[in-house]
Amino acid sequence: MQINVNKPYLPNKNKYYKYLDKIWENNHLTNFGPLNKELENRLCEYLGVENLLLVGNGTLALQIAYKLLGLSANDGVITTPFSFVATTSTLIWENLVPIFCDINNKSFCIDTNKIEALINTNTKAILPVHTFGNACDVEALDKIAKKYKLKLIYDAAHAFGVRYKNKSIFNYGDISTISFHATKLFHTTEGGAIVFQDKDMLDEAKSIINFGLKNNMPEVLGINTKNSEFHAAMGLCVLDDIEYIMQDREKIWKYYYEHLKNDFDFQELNPDANNNYHYFPILFENQENMISKINLLNQNKIFPRRYFYPSLDTLGFYDIKEVCNISRDIASRILCLPIYVGLKEKEQDIIIKYLKEK
Ligand SMILES: *Cc1c(COP(=O)(O)O)cnc(C)c1O
């Protein structure tokens, strides 16, 4: 049997069918339907946020955030090179200029001590990532954003359920964006959400994601990235099981940690935030050792993933000035191990055995 880095969580099928019955009854398939409203309300309650809007995916969530905060062509945005490509590609797609700030070699989040040196008159925003769900230094980021009047957008795609000093991590910055892709901790098949601090911004966003329509008239420049009722139905079923999902991931995470803690280095977690056990990254001494382990695992039908790799300051399709050596170094020797609901201890034992083999 093959073990992949991830396996999407599938809820009880009969429960999903009951939601399908509701969709048939309502005859309302998309465009802010009742299941979308129900899911938004339940997510607000579960996460402890006020203004949450469901959108098509985590990528468009970022693009909508840039628009709403008034970023325009050629504005500079300070961001991290150690992330999934969408953090950077969305900036480029919107004709914004990514300015890469290196990461801290322990937290793998943006190094807040290196941001100020990168700020110039063209800089309009900061876009950090809560890397692998590890909360950024949100207080330092807040200070810098205020001091230089920069917008602060968090790509919080990995941070579902993370709380910092007992407050949802999504409540920091101007906007947080989340991904509800099938491979994420909580998912709606495809999907995502935007969390706003400002309620007016949420109302504006509702029209932007619906062609810019207000009272059915095109009043502002918009796009289409609404979520269907089928996506919301999946989300409602998965949300019902969220405690179980969290507990199972925690068990798997801790089992790996217990058995590997003397063999590898790990990301240092923010002591003021909780771990959501979304990923299990391990750090090798060098790339060569890692690649030989990957080969060994692959031969045995185990497929961990090099994540994040490559460091985004090396992207070939965009001319980048900054060189982020820490990000490049970490990206070259980090590996994410399989972690998903239902992964068995027996399977973990096999993975651990291969990793420990000399
Ligand atoms: C998954 C992910 C995204 C993109 O989200 P989609 O819903 O797949 O579009 C963006 N940023 C990060 C850090 C991600 O991990």
Image: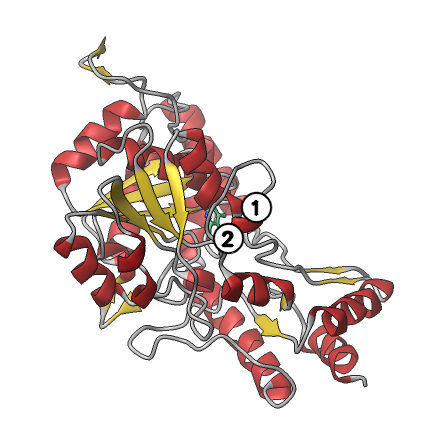
Q: In the rendered structure, which amino acid carries the disc numbered 1?
A: Lys
* Residue at the farthest bottom position: 262
Task: Report the side of 57 relative to 349 (left or right).
Answer: left
Find out if the beta carbon at label 2 lies less than 8 Å from the nearest ligand 1 atom: yes
- Give the percent coordinates (x, y) of residue 356: 75, 84
Q: Secondary structure at mark 1?
A: helix
Mark 1 — residue? Answer: 13
Q: Secondary structure at mark 2?
A: loop
Give the residue displayed 63% in from the left and 57% down from the top: 6
Give the residue displayed 31% in from the left and 42% down from the top: 194
Disc number for residue 184: 2
Count neighbours of disc 2 (C-alpha within 10 A) and say few if under 14, some if 14 to 19, many if 20 or more.
many
- Give the percent coordinates (x, y) of residue 358: 81, 85
Q: Nearer the viewer, residue 229 or 86?
A: 86
Task: Report the side of 209 relative to 287 (left or right).
Answer: left
Residue 336: tell me if it is visible.
no
Q: Does residue 204 sit above or below 45 in this rendering?
A: above
- Give the percent coordinates (x, y) of residue 357: 80, 84
Count neighbours of disc 1 (C-alpha within 10 A) and say few if under 14, some if 14 to 19, many if 20 or more.
few
Disc number for residue 161: none
Q: Earlier in the sequence, mark 1 or mark 2?
A: 1
Q: Does residue 231 sit above or below 303 in this rendering?
A: above
